[in-house]
Image: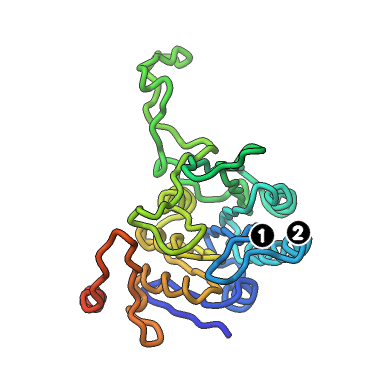
Amino acid sequence: MMKKFEKNGHTIIFGDAIEALSREIADNSINLIFADPPYNIGKNFNGRKDKWESDEDYLDWCYQWLDLCIKKLKPNGSFYVMTSTQNMPYFDIYLRKRLTVLSRIIWYYDSSGVQAKKYYGSLYEPILFCVKDKNNYTFNSEDILVEAKTGAIRKLIDYRKPAPTVYNPKKVPGNVWEIPRVRYRMDEYENHPTQKPIALLERIIKASSNEGDIILDPFSGTFTTSFVAKQYKRKSIGIEIEEEYVKIGLRRLQIASEYNGQILKKEPRSFETPIDEKQIMLNFSEE
């Protein structure tokens, strides 16, 4: 049974992604979708194991929600989708028959943890950036400019222009994004094995949506997509099947201060002082 929580243009749906997409989201209603599904690699999501009986079963499931996401997108909508490196070729082939794939993005991060010793360990995750109409979609390039690390820093002159000028110090990011993974000691950390960083969603949301747009995340996890959407004055819909993560979303979006009689508070990490529940209630009442 699904539950919905709504406040100030932000909706959390507690339930199965395919069921929620089918029953709760209107066709052609979403401006931007970011999908970060389970990767079928055995991660433990609060007791829910990320592993299907076979690769074929996993892909069959993925094709169901991919089709639904495509139906929910507006004609000028954008779709960013992630999966494991081994499954991305199947996603790519499937989606390029239904959408236009504009970019194949590599989210690169360093790893201080144990790496493979008998093969090359993975230090990236792939992202597809797709649109329904390659001639009509949102891309706010000026909002995501980054430092140009080549000619501009060295003050090299671009002699190809009619009037030779120094290279522009800013540029639109390429398709390799070096953004650190969320670590335990970071302020944004939540208790989730595959939390995506705020900086990653900031780039996607600023580039591919405008204020007031509706952003959908069918596998919300810690609700970073919805959290960032709120910061940038977008609306959001987040779907999540695991109750513990729904509670994180309710707290991060300030939709509720308690759930089934339980005060919603961020669990203190080993180096932090326990959080004062009375102060939580006071802060929430002031919103």
Q: Name which residue lies at 51% across and 83% down.
A: 3
Figure colour scheme: rainbow
Residue closest to the eye, 73 or 192: 192
Q: Name which residue lies at 42% across and 20% down.
A: 151
Q: How many marks?
A: 2
Give percent across and percent down for residue 154.
37, 17
Within-10-Å neighbours for mark 1: few <14, some 14–19, many 20+: some
Residue closest to the eye, 100 or 187: 187
Within-10-Å neighbours for mark 2: few <14, some 14–19, many 20+: few
In this rendering, is residue 31 above or below 121? below
Residue closest to the eye, 128 or 159: 128
> Could you say which quadrant of the image residue 9 lies in?
bottom left
Write down the residue under mark 2: 55
Write down the residue under mark 1: 40
Element type at mark 2: helix
Relative horizontal placement of residue 191, taking residue 136 as reference (left or right): left
Element type at mark 1: loop
Q: Earlier in the sequence, mark 2 or mark 1?
A: 1
Residue closest to the eye, 260 or 66: 260
Relative horizontal placement of residue 170, taking residue 30 as reference (left or right): left
> Could you say which quadrant of the image residue 121 lies in?
top right
Give percent across and percent down for residue 184.
39, 55
- What's the residue type where badge 2 is placed? Asp
Q: Do residues under tags 2 and 1 come within 8 Å of each other at their CB atoms?
A: yes
Give percent across and percent down for residue 112.
46, 42
- What's the residue type where badge 1 is placed? Asn
Relative horizontal placement of residue 64, taking residue 261 as reference (left or right): right
CA separation in Å, label 2 and label 1: 8 Å
Q: Name which residue lies at 64% across and 72% down.
A: 18
Q: Which mark, residue 283?
A: none
In this rendering, is residue 39 above or below 179? below
Q: Name which residue lies at 61% across and 43% down.
A: 102
